[in-house]
Amino acid sequence: MPFNNRSQRQLASLRRMREWHLDQALRAKVNGKKQEAEFHFRYYDLLGPAVEVPQRGDSD
């Protein structure tokens, strides 16, 4: 199913959100904030399947 512009914008937004969570997780880890880092890493992982769209020909 082809993506329309809205779908593409939504995916781009989710990708930015995922990258933000990764950035926050790494900052928290460097600053010794273990709980905060785990929180952001968890959301980074949860958003992964939402933004990783299989390309054509990737059917296993």
Image (cartoon, rainbow, N blue to C red):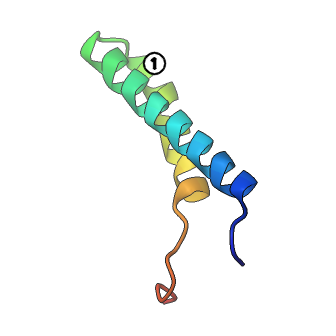
Residue marked by disc 1: 35
Is residue 46 something that shows in the picture? no
- Hey, which residue is sitting farthest front in the picture? 5
List x then y, in percent, for residue 19. 44, 36
Give the structural element (helix, strand or loop) at label 1: helix
Q: Is residue 38 left or right of residue 8?
A: left
- Residue at image location 51% in from the left, 26% down from the top: 39
List x then y, in percent, for residue 46. 57, 46
Viewer-proximal residue among 50 and 25: 50
How many numbered markers are drawn? Answer: 1
- Look at label 1 and name its amino acid: Gln
Q: Is residue 10 left or right of residue 42?
A: right
Quarter of the figure that contains the N terminus = bottom right
Other-residue count near label 1 (Cα within 10 Å), few / some / many at <14 / 14–19 / ≥20: few
- Residue at image location 28% in from the left, 9% down from the top: 31
Viewer-proximal residue among 12 and 58: 12
Viewer-proximal residue among 39 and 3: 3
Question: In which image quadrant can residue 23 be found?
Answer: top left
List x then y, in percent, for residue 20. 47, 29
- Hey, which residue is sitting farthest left in the picture? 30
List x then y, in percent, for residue 32. 29, 11
- Residue at image location 55% in from the left, 66% down from the top: 53
- Residue at image location 52% in from the left, 88% down from the top: 59
Is residue 50 something that shows in the picture? yes
